[in-house]
Amino acid sequence: MKTIITIAFRNLLRHKRRTFLTGIVISFGLFIYIFMDSIMSGLDRGSMDNLINLSTSAVQIYTKEYDENKESYPLKYGLQDLDGIEKTLLTHDRVKSVTPRTKFLGELSNYEESMPVIGTVVDPDRDKTVFKLIEHLVGNYFSEKSERQIILGKDLAREMGVEPGGFITMYALTKYESRNADDFKVVGLFNTTDPALNKSGVFITFDAANSFLDLENTVTEMNVQLKRRINFDDLLDDMEEVLDLVKKDLPGLSAYSFKQLGAGILALVKGKKNWGAGMTLVFLLIAAVGIVNSVLMSVYERIREVGVLRAMGMGGKEITWMFMCEGIMIGFVGSLGGVILGVISVIILTTYGWPLDKIYGDMYIDTAGFPVWGTIYGEWNIPLIIGVFLFGILTALLASIPPARKAAKMEVTSALRFI
Amino acid sequence: MAVLELKDVKKVFKKGDQEVHALRGVTLTIEKGEFLSVVGPSGSGKTTLLNITGCLDTPTSGSVIYNGKELGRMKEKGLSDYRKDNIAFIFQSYNLIPVLTVKENVELPLVIEKKHSKQDMAERALEIIELVGLKGMENRLPREISGGQEQRVAIARALVKKPLVVLADEPTANLDSETAEEVIALMQKINQERQTTFVFSTHDPRMQKHAKREIVLRDGTVKSDERK
C-alpha cells in the first residue's frame, strides 16, 4: 500500500500544474461555500438580532391572563412584584438586562386623517439596555420631562405629515377603558429595519402613559436581553434555559422566547439554508469533472506503466487504488485549501464584519423577510466546515473511481503496446 | 529439465470480421538455464509467442505448461498470480516507473509479491543493483540515468525475485552498440551464474550471435529451432 501511495503522490507532484488546477477548483468551490454560508448566516443573524433588539427581545414574560388576551393588548393584566421577577431573571448568568414595557392600541390623528398604531410604553433609561431603538433614531430620545413626548416610526410620521418638534394627537383607551386623547410632541423618529414598526409603531414613556392611559405604572410585559453568543443556536439554548427558569421559579407567569416569537423568521432561515447545498453541489460537480479529467489523463499517460505493473503481477484492485489515491489526494489537498481559505474568510468576517452601510450606503439587504443593515458579521459553522471538507474528499474519491477502474480493466498486452 | 512447454499453441485474433492467425500451432520445450532467442520478421508472431509464454495472454488452443503445471486455461487472476511469482519481463523501452528511484523500481516486484520484509527487499535490491553495475545510483530517478543504465535497472528489476523465466522483448533495440554489448554480456553472465532462463525476441544480430538456441518464426509457425 505504501508503494501505491508513493507512486500516486509522486505522480501528483510530477504534474504539479494539473494537480494545482484541479485542486484549486475544489478549493475555490469549498471556500465560496464556507464564505457564503458564513455571510448568509451572518445576514440571517443580523435579521434575527434586529428583531430581538427592536421588537421581541430574547424572552418576554407576561401574566397568564395577559397571555390569553394579548392580541388586544389589555392594560388591566399587569405584572406584580417586578423587582422579584427581575431578581429571579438576573440569577441566570446569561441574562444581561431586563426592562418593562406595556403595549397598547391607539390612533394617531393630524385632524385630517388618522392611523391606527401599536403603542409601546417604555422606561427610557432601562429600555436602552434591552432594545436598540436609540441606534435607529432621527431627532432626539426622550428627555427627563417626557410627559408629552412621543417617538414614532419614520413612515408613520411621513403619512401623518409630522416631523421632530411637531405635535400629533393620539387617541387610546385607558386602563379603565375610557377613551382619551392628548397631544404629544414628536421628539424623534425611528427608521428601523422592521417595516411594520416604522409604519405603525409609537413609543411613549411611563410618565406619559400614567396620565394618558391611567396606567399607574402597569407593566404588561418584561423583556429580557441575553449576553451575546457567537453562534445563534447557543443563544437559542440560553433562551430555553431562561424559559425553564421562569417555569421553575415564576410558575404563575407565561414566558416566550424568540424561538416562539420569531418562529416565522426562524423557519424562513432554516429553509433558506438549502440554497447552500445546491450551490455546493454545482461547485463540487465542476470539481468532480476536473478530478475525473485529471485522473483520466493520468491513466492515459501511464497506460504502459499500468501494463508493466500488471505484467509484474499487480492486481486490478491495487491498480484501482493507485489511481483512486491520486483522486483522494487531490481531493484532500483541494478540500484542505478550501477549508483554510474558508476559515480565514470566516475569521475576517466574524472579527471585522462586512460594513454594508459603508459599501451600499442607505440601501439595506432583505434576507429572511426582515432586512438588515450596518455591519454584518459572519457566523461560525464548524460542523458545516468539517462536513464540507469530508464531502470534498468524498467527491474526489467517487470521481476517481471510473477512470481508476478503466485502468484496472485494461488488457495487459494492449497496455504494453500503447504508445 | 523442462521449465516451459508449449504444445500446439494457436492464437487467433479477431479484427472485425477477419480472423488473424498469429500462431498456427507452435510446439516448444524450453529447458532451465537456456539463453534462447526468438527471431522472425514483423508479424511472424514473436510478440504473441512471448505474451503467451509470459502468461500475459492465453492461447486460443493448445497447452502452456510451466514446471508441469498447465496454465493455458487459467483466468486472468490465476495468470497474474503465476506471473508475479515466476516470470519477469524486460521491455524494449525499459518501462521503468518514472516516479520511483532505481532502488524502488528494483524492489517493485518484491513489493507486489508481498512476501518479503522491508529489510529483505532492500538487501536483495542492493545486491542485484550491484550485480548490474549501478551501485551508487540507487537513489536516482530514471530520468537522471542513461538509456543503457535504465535497461540495466530493468534487468535488475526482472532478476530481483529470482524468476523461473525472464522474457525480454527486443531488449537492445533502443541501445547503442557499446551499451547493447554490455547489456547482452550482463544477461549472459546472469544466465550462466544463476542458471536463469532467458527467452528474448530480437532483430538484433548482436543478440542473435550470443543466443545458445535460436527459434525462427514465420507466419505463426516455427521455421527452425537450432541449438548452437
Image (cartoon, helix red, strand yellow):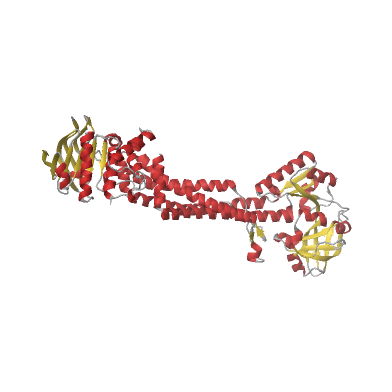
Q: Is residue B75 left or right of residue A392?
A: left
Q: Is residue B135 left or right of residue A333?
A: left
- A108 in relation to A316, above or below: below
Front-most of A176 and A336?
A: A336
- Estimate the x, y position of residue B178 in percent, counting from the top left: 21, 49
- Residue, x 52% and y 54% (percent of image)? A279
Name of the residue lying farthest toward the front: B136
- Residue, x 72% and y 53% (percent of image)? A52
Q: Residue A155: which quarter of the image?
A: bottom right
- Residue, x 63% and y 65% (percent of image)? A359
Q: Is residue B19 left or right of residue A182?
A: left
- B68 in relation to A337, above or below: above
- Estimate the x, y position of residue A248 in percent, counting from the top left: 77, 38
- Estimate the x, y position of residue B34 in percent, counting from the top left: 18, 36
Residue A277 in view (yes/no): no
Front-most of A54 and B155?
A: B155
Question: The N terminus of chain A lies in which quarter of the figure?
Answer: top left
- Estimate the x, y position of residue A56 in percent, counting from the top left: 73, 52
